[in-house]
């Protein structure tokens, strides 16, 4: 331990702690823009200034390790004036477009400028205009708003190992050869948008379109679906804790906004298990391509298509649960309700920006050519829509999903966590293949934050070897090993974001260091409390097979629930 004072009070911390970490632990506010606990510190913004030795000398809290006896001051006039000066310098280069900016009211620069009462006193420092990049259905880049914190660059390289964004000659992050994002190898994961503190990289928002649609339905039936990971994160936008379970309130909010029907993507997660589990058993029995790869994460699909096209045959042919649900709504449910598919609008609520890209895939259209998922709103966008409509989320009375496509199980909700698809698949595949339940439903070897998790399951004579990989940088490492023949598995789950969908690029921008752990616990709590925790025991899933699909991998299943990929 080292002992020091913090604004005159005695404190202690373990050796090697930075001043910033100690301040955060002690609830002392220190302004930052370039710092994020999940990324390396880069000393770019010059805002985390503190005094350490009773002189006026200033140090950066993010990169200064506490020494024994330091007298740290974060709130002197000298510190505050220096922070204000540096903020005013950033402001001089920043377009003042707050009123039309996607990040208005959730912008870290805006927050600090207000908090410190910064006066916009320096003459405008004009930068050369950079054309906005609207090429991606998932993301918009307006690098004129960039404050050069480089969090996007670090997210793309350190966390995702993608290296799409690098620092250009003018100090502004750029794509390879300055190409439009959608024409690069970007996978639309949205990590860059999640970490951007301002409005330079944002989700390609459809809040206005959905808001207008809900106000003027024009005879359309608006059907929502909500992804597993949204229900443990949306609460953060309304002052609650990460991991607080808000399923019923989220459904109630959607109804209040004007949604006619609310289905649960969890239902098609259960259906995915039926189809994907059967596909795995079929590939093992009949010598199909192994290892089989999960196919529900759209960032992962983009990565395989762009970087590992030789592995396309390894991908399960199952559409993602989002894709299956939208297909069911337009091709199955609408007909049963006597509504024309063209009069149904599907709005999907996802933790993920890449789902916006998945929605526009050519393969995911009805036979008549209708896009099956019409709009995708991220969890952040749904929260924005709720706030715009002044719905009091925290005090809403909980509401239930519509049925039958709203019925789900504990196995479905754990899709939101890394390892969840694997655990759900094992619960079902084991029981179907061996005609007895797995010895334990909580299959811990595939849980937790380790980047590459491996396990061997005794499948009655066959040792079923599985692996679970999350976060793109770990995926690159695994794929290299697979290429080199250093690993061999039957079934592998891939999720592009750290933690799985709970860490999706469209989730609320939490800045605490434990938000992912809390969201993960929230998901497992929902599973623990479900009466039914296996996908094949979902009664509505059984019914849809009896009434429509007949059995997994049937001709109809292939047509409506499976897909193919670009090579
Ligand atoms: Fe996911 Fe999935 S779990 S991909 O992580 O398979 O986005 O939550 O909706 O589709 O169900 C995301 C989450 C999500 C799909 C499911
Ligand atoms: Fe990099 Fe992902 Fe952003 Fe694309 S979406 S630039 S891959 S962080």
Image (tube, rainbow, N blue to C red):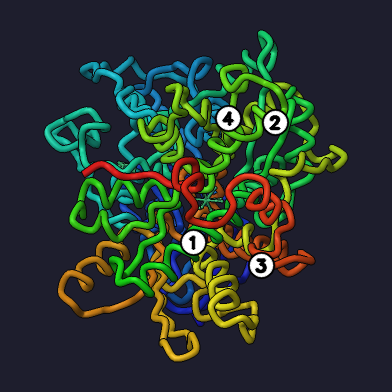
Of marks 3 and 4, which one's residue comes earlier in the chain?
4
Residue plotted at (37% across, 23% down): 94
Tell me residue 317's x, y (percent).
Answer: 38, 52
Q: In this view, does 398 lie to the left or right of 479?
A: right
Residue neighbourhood size for the residue with mark 1, other residues' Cα within 10 Å, grouped as few (<14), some (14–19), many (≥20): many
Disc number for residue 461: none
Q: Where is 244 relative to 78, above or below?
A: below
Residue neighbourhood size for the residue with mark 3, other residues' Cα within 10 Å, grouped as few (<14), some (14–19), many (≥20): many
Query: Which residue was labeled with disc 2?
Result: 336
Question: Tag 3, which secondary structure?
Answer: loop
Query: Which residue was labeled with disc 1?
Result: 499
**Do the numbered discs 4 and 2 sit on residues whose CB atoms are within 8 Å?**
no
State the image quarter where residue 385 is shown.
top right
Of marks 4 and 1, which one's residue comes earlier in the chain?
4
Question: Tag 4, which secondary structure?
Answer: helix
Of marks 1 and 2, which one's residue comes earlier in the chain?
2
Q: In this view, does 46 lie to the left or right of 246?
A: left
* Labels 4, 1: front one: 4
Q: In this view, does 16 lie to the left or right of 311?
A: right
Residue plotted at (46% across, 26% down): 371
Query: Which residue was labeled with disc 4?
Result: 330
Residue plotted at (12% across, 33% down): 177
Residue neighbourhood size for the residue with mark 4, other residues' Cα within 10 Å, grouped as few (<14), some (14–19), many (≥20): many
Of marks 4 and 2, which one's residue comes earlier in the chain?
4
């Amino acid at each position: 331990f080292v002992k020091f004072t913090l604004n005159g009070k005695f404190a202690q911390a373990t050796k090697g702690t930075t001043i910033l970490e100690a301040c955060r632990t002690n609830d002392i506010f220190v302004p930052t823009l370039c710092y994020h606990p999940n990324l390396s510190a880069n000393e770019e913004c010059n805002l985390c200034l503190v005094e350490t030795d009773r002189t006026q000398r200033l140090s950066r809290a993010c990169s200064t390790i506490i020494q024994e006896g330091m007298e740290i001051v974060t709130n002197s006039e000298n510190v505050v004036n220096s922070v204000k000066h540096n903020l005013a310098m950033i402001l001089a280069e920043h377009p003042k477009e707050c009123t039309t900016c996607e990040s208005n009211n959730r912008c870290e620069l805006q927050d600090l400028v207000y908090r410190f009462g910064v006066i916009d006193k320096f003459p405008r420092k004009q930068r050369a205009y950079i054309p906005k990049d609207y090429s991606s259905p998932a993301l918009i880049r307006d690098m004129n708003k960039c404050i050069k914190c480089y969090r996007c660059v670090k997210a793309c390289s350190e966390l995702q190992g993608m290296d799409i964004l690098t620092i250009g000659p003018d100090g502004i992050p750029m794509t390879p050869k300055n190409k439009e994002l959608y024409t690069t190898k970007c996978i639309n994961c949205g990590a860059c948008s999640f970490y951007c503190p301002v409005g330079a990289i944002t989700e390609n928002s459809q809040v206005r379109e959905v808001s207008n649609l809900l106000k003027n339905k024009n005879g359309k039936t608006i059907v929502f679906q909500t992804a597993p990971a949204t229900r443990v994160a949306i609460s953060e936008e309304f002052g609650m804790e990460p991991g607080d379970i808000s399923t019923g309130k989220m459904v109630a909010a959607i109804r209040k906004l004007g949604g006619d029907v609310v289905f649960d993507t969890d239902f098609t997660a259960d259906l995915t298990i039926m189809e994907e589990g059967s596909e795995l058993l079929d590939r093992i029995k009949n010598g199909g391509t192994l290892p089989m790869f999960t196919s529900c994460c759209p960032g992962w699909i983009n990565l395989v298509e762009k970087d590992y096209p030789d592995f396309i045959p390894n991908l399960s042919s199952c559409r993602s649960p989002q894709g299956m649900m939208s297909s069911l709504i337009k091709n199955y449910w609408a007909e049963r309700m006597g509504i024309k598919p063209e009069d149904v609008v599907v709005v999907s609520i996802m933790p993920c920006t890449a789902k916006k890209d998945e929605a526009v895939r050519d393969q995911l259209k009805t036979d008549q050519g209708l896009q099956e998922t019409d709009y995708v709103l991220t969890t952040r966008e749904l929260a924005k829509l709720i706030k715009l409509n002044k719905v009091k989320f925290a005090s809403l009375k909980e509401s239930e999903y519509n049925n039958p496509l709203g019925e789900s199980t504990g196995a479905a909700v754990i899709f939101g966590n890394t390892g969840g698809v694997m655990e759900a698949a094992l619960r079902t595949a084991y029981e179907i293949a061996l005609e007895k339940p797995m010895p334990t439903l909580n299959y811990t070897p595939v849980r937790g934050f380790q980047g590459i998790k491996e396990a061997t399951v005794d499948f009655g004579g066959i040792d079923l070897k599985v692996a679970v990989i999350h976060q793109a940088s770990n995926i690159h490492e695994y794929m290299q090993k697979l290429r080199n023949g250093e690993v061999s598995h039957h079934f592998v789950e891939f999720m592009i974001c750290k933690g799985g969908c709970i860490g999706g690029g469209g989730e609320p921008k939490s800045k605490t260091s434990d938000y992912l752990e809390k969201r993960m616990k929230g998901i497992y709590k929902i599973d623990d409390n479900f009466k039914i925790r296996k996908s094949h025991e979902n009664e509505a899933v059984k019914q849809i097979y009896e009434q429509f699909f007949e059995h997994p991998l049937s001709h109809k299943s292939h047509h409506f629930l499976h897909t193919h990929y670009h090579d």
